[in-house]
Amino acid sequence: MAQKIRVTPRDVEADIINGIKQGKKQSKASYRRERIGLFIAACLLVIIEFIYPPFFLWLLPALIAFLLVLLPIAYIRQRRRIQRVTMGDYTVQRAIVSQTAHEEYWEKSGRRHSRLVEFYTLSFEGGATWQIPEEGYRWCMKPPATARVIYESAHRGDEFFLVTHKESGEVAVAYHAALFDWCAG
């Protein structure tokens, strides 16, 4: 039997930061809701353009100013969230996998191009769910484990170490107990 990889709080912090940087993928349903909302907003803008043309004389500069303010704010928030990651805000507990889920769909990424989006989640007893990041465990595996590899190694009834946020209860990262050994110090 292969030796288990020891997970320390510093390793967990590295994985949490990696998850924040990668962001979360959208499920197919939320992707469609977002696209429908953007489509409706674009239709309304076209209708307003025909009804009241001077409206667009101030709309374009306002949109540009909005984006110039919004994008740096989103970047600053992400940087602050990464700087605030400490193990004191998270708890580690054992949990059993109750269900695995895989969803895939094609997302338009240009006029003629589409890309396949794969979305993997693990559900645990007690109601916790974890969306598996694109690449995980960068600190111990070269190359990092992909979401598909992590998903295919997890089966119903397997034991995982869950790292959950104390306030929100959201699962930040999970470690398969057959591969990893939790070391609190």
Image (cartoon, rainbow, N blue to C red):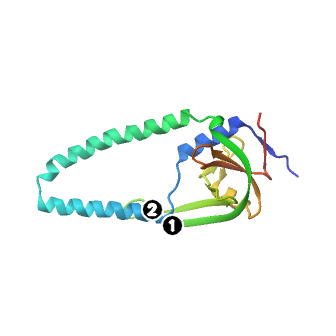
Within the image, what quadrant is residue 51 found in? bottom left
* Residue in view at x 48 percent, y 39 percent: 78
Q: Which residue is mark 2?
A: 31
Q: Amino acid at mark 1?
A: Tyr
Up the image or down, 38 lies above or below 172; here it is below
Q: Is residue 73 left or right of residue 151?
A: left
Residue at the outermost right position: 1
Relative to 118, say whether 73 is above or below: above
Q: Nearer the viewer, mark 1 or mark 2?
A: 2
Q: Is residue 46 left or right of residue 185?
A: left
Crowd around label 2: few <14 · some 14–19 · many ≥20 (10 Å): few
- Does residue 153 appear to the left or right of 74 in the view shown? right
Please tell me in which quadrant of the rendered image residue 33 appears. Answer: bottom left
Dot 2 lies on which element?
Answer: helix
| x and y, in percent, of residue 90 in the image | 65, 41
Q: Position of residue 17 (x, y in %)?
A: 59, 40
Q: Residue at horizontal 35%, vertical 61%?
A: 37
From this viewpoint, is residue 31 visible? Answer: yes
The amino acid type of the residue labelled 2 equals Tyr
Please report contact status of discs 1 and 2: CB closer than 8 Å, yes or no. Answer: yes
Assign the C terminus to one quadrant of the image.
Answer: top right
| Residue 9 in the image, given as x and y percentages of width and height | 70, 36
Binning the other alpha carbons within 10 Å of mark 1 as few (below 14), some (14 to 19) or many (20 upward) gives some
| Residue drawn at the location 36% of the way across and 65% of the way down | 36
In this figure, which residue is indicated by the disc labeled 1? Answer: 105
- How far across and down, in percent of the image, does residue 103 sit? 57, 66
SS of the residue at dot 1? strand
Q: Residue at x 55, y 32 (%)?
A: 83
- Give the Cα distance between marks 1 and 2: 10 Å
The residue nearer to you, when weighing 156 against 144, is: 156
Q: Is residue 114 visible?
A: no
Mark 1 or mark 2: whose residue is earlier in sequence: 2
